Amino acid sequence: MARMVALGSALQDVYLIDHDDLSPTKIGEEAIFGKVLVGSKVDIDKLHYGIGGGGINSAITFARSGHEVVFLGNIARDSAGEAIMRVLDREGVDNSYVNFLERKTTGTSVILLDSKGGERTILTYRGASEKFDNFREEDLDLIQPDWIYVTTLRGDMETLAKFFKKAKTLNTKIMFNPGVKELEQDKKLIRLLSFVDVLLVNKSEAAKIVLGKVLLELLYHLNGYVQTVIITDGPMGGIASDRKEIYRFGIYEDTKVKDATGAGDAFGAGFLARLANGYSFKDSLIFASANSTSVVSKVGANTGALFDTTILHPMPIQKI
């Protein structure tokens, strides 16, 4: 068991689920939800409420693996914020470091989900999770975590730098899954990588940080900055290295995707949850893939997050 801090956003997720009106329509190489007419009223098959956001999703995976977890994020004193606090309590996540922002509402995502094909479009109001400049890196002095897991802070490189530097003074390790806003600032991002112990990106994101087109090339270049690098490649699996071993892995199992929301968070948090419990690099990758597969097989960004006691079956993974 380790002491973990999950740093990132907190959102209420509202799913509008339908089997035909939200079916995607192809327009060239793109697709839209083409059966919803402007000005029409559409009957939805099902309504589902959940909570999500990178910080929340990772915190729940860590807690289900038996870790002592602190969530650090922003919400408001409203019904959505209350729902988030209740779920964190239920999952055994320490929410005493949550910031309640005045004159803000809790972030909310409305997710249009095609129940037939699993495609979805997400409409997000960031609300209290729009900015993170109120975060206090001094909180880490009180928490004394073994790891911090950081998802996007919406491009707030200054706050990221403060937390990364503070973590290193405490010998706290860092796993980082940057978002679009961080990737847009590639030079600042590269400077931050010197503090990072584990980096998780997908193939297209990796190509925005370093030169390269194929996975092995991208991995080699990123390994020059970070000791442990994981690059995912959708249904093709991915590649990972800790400078000692390199693994090429496929997906855990071929399953029907009901909702892809939270898949990346499930993979990253699943990897660290296992690694921090003393499992090998290979075993941690397998659990990461299994956790992501389980999450996309259910509606909700963290509904299917696995417990550490889950028995896993073999999957395609090869040491290079």
Image: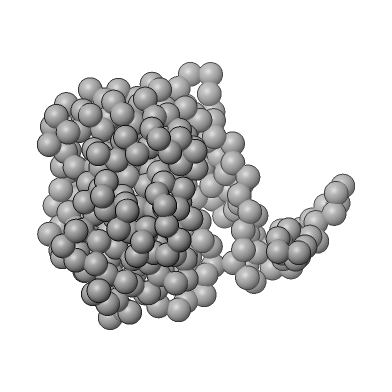
Residue 6 in percent (x, y) is at: 31, 41
Q: Is residue 305 above or below residue 68?
A: below
Residue 36 in percent (x, y) is at: 80, 56
Residue sitting nearer the eye, 16 or 238? 238
Residue sitting nearer the eye, 126 or 195? 195
Q: How is the image coloured?
A: one colour
Q: Residue at x 31, y 79 (%)?
A: 315
In the image, taking residue 17 as reference, residue 182 lies left or right, namely left
Residue at the front extreme, as displayed: 211
Q: Residue at x 59, y 67 (%)?
A: 118
Residue 131 in percent (x, y) is at: 47, 27
Indicate the quadrant where residue 53 lies.
Answer: top left
Q: Residue at x 31, y 35 (%)?
A: 192
Residue at the top extreme, as displayed: 102
Indicate the quadrant where residue 55 lies.
Answer: top left
Q: Residue at x 44, y 72 (%)?
A: 236
Q: Is residue 177 above or below residue 82?
A: below
Question: Which quadrant: the C terminus?
Answer: bottom left
In the image, taking residue 289 as reference, residue 50 lies left or right, namely right
Question: Total of numbered circles in the picture?
Answer: 0
Q: Is residue 223 visible?
A: yes
Q: Is residue 89 visible?
A: no
Residue 140 in percent (x, y) is at: 21, 29
Indicate the quadrant where residue 232 lies.
Answer: bottom left
Residue at the right extreme, as displayed: 39
Residue sitting nearer the eye, 301 or 226? 226
In the image, taking residue 77 as reference, residue 307 lies left or right, namely left
